[in-house]
Amino acid sequence: MKLAIIGTGYVGLVTGACFAEMGNEVICVDTDTAKVEALEQGRIPIYEPGLEDYVKRNAQDHRLTFTTDLAAAVQQSLACFIAVGTPQDRDGSADLSMVLQVAKDIGRHMNGYKVIVEKSTVPVGTAVQVRRVIQEELAARGEAFEFDVVSNPEFLKEGTALDDFMKPDRVVVGCDDVRVGELMKELYAPFVRTNAPIIIMDVVSAELTKYAANAFLATKISFINEIANICSRTGADIKMVRQGIGSDRRIGPLFLFPGLGYGGSCFPKDMQALIHTARSLGYPPRILEAAESVNQDQRQLFFDCISKHFHGALKGLVFAVWGLSFKPLTDDIRDAPALTLIDKLREAGARLQVHDPEAMPATRQALGDNSDVSFAGSSYEALDGADALLICTEWAKFREPDFERIKSRLKTPVIFDGRNLYNPDKLAKLGFQYFYIGQKVD
């Protein structure tokens, strides 16, 4: 099938590469000439394990091409996937300006029947707006081409996006016509050979499904953090509690890891968008609001723990920070807990020595030139002369470090673990003061 993927950000690039991997002819479109030229040369603008190989292989086999010519891409393709950004607006809603601009451009250039697929995460009612914009452009041209608008939300996790796309738990398709539903089933058939379901529903339900899924997972993270905070006041062991509830099949163990809370490009933005949608309909989304509040509080509680240990005298102290990305296996620092913590410590007069396997370039760009933050070439180098180690991201390389080496390079053997990576008894025997999420408060 001939496909146009409009937008070569995280979702668009993964979608295009995976469809090409299954033999489709895919044209990826972007307005950024420099990005398109880089992609044509095999340079990937994001870090996602395996994606570079997919892009290079399919580009070499001419199944995947990149262009700034949206008109040609639309005219050569049967299905046009809209995969541009929907950033959070000032009021918390999703900014649909880029989505609607793409819809307008499609209406200006379509030359026959097209399937217009919402791949961007969009609020309920967006398909109606996309249809209206395209119809207005066609009317202005004096054309009356038929087209269908489909909602096909993505459920990709940064760090495992290729597996998520190639072997999905489910594929959700929202459409109002049986024929286009069958076409989408044909497109996705190679990805569901292990009998993962392709769920056909109405467009509005599909649009809401994406937000509901992310909101549920975000709420699950805030729930276990709430329980961890209760554990810290009762003396209960959060690891045991997590095991006790996670083994219940109705609950499950995934997303039940206490820590600094969720971040990234999806959960925070999608929670705010869903909250905004509910409020605009006159419904108070109390659970969602509480989950968001707990998530923000979690970062402050961690900072308060650090401040309390040093009796509030943080000025002039040096902290080593392991992990900057909002989760491992990505260089994404959007709404990363580490950056919130760095800002709070800098405001208190502390200096930071930071290390991350992938996210240091993005962090340098985000923080700009300053003397408060230095970037270490290795995790151990970040420790030199620091008053404590702060762990903010659970990269695999941080899970089994040389603790004697850590102890010898720190000024004082203190670890604040925002991801609960280590055994408290083991670290106590090694002479560390070890603070973690859910630890009993004295």
Image: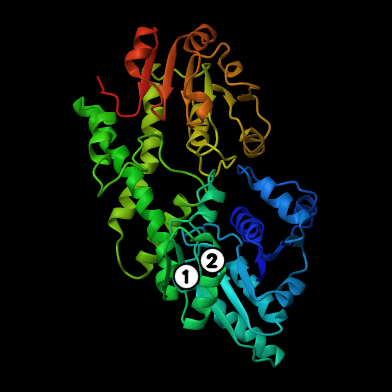
Helix, strand or loop at mark 2: helix
Q: Which mark is residue 386?
A: none
Is 148 placed left or right of 226 in the picture?
A: right
Q: CA distance from mark 2 to mark 1?
A: 10 Å
Q: Is disc 1 surrounded by few (<14), some (14 to 19) or many (20+) residues within 10 Å?
A: many
228 lies above or below 221: above
Is 299 placed left or right of 386 in the picture?
A: left
Q: Amino acid at mark 1?
A: Val
Which residue: 72% across, 79% down?
Answer: 109
216 lies above or below 25: above
* Residue 45 in sight here: no
- Between 316 and 341, the one lying in front of the other is 341
Which residue: 62% across, 21% down?
Answer: 378
Q: Are marks 2 and 1 in contact (CB under 8 Å)?
A: yes
Helix, strand or loop at mark 1: strand
Question: Where does residue 168 sit, x and y in percent of width and height?
Answer: 48, 56
Quadrant, the C terminus? top left
- Between 269 and 110, the one lying in front of the other is 110
- Between 169 and 229, the one lying in front of the other is 169
Q: What residue is pinned by disc 1? A: 173
* Residue 320 in sight here: yes
Question: Where does residue 40 sit, x and y in percent of width and height?
Answer: 79, 53
Query: Which comes before the other along the chain, label 2 or label 1?
Result: 1
Which residue: 30% across, 45% down?
Answer: 252
Which residue: 49% across, 77% down?
Answer: 181
- Between 7 and 365, the one lying in front of the other is 7
Quadrant, the N terminus? bottom right
Mark 2 or mark 1, whichever is nearer to me = 2
Q: What residue is pinned by disc 2? A: 188
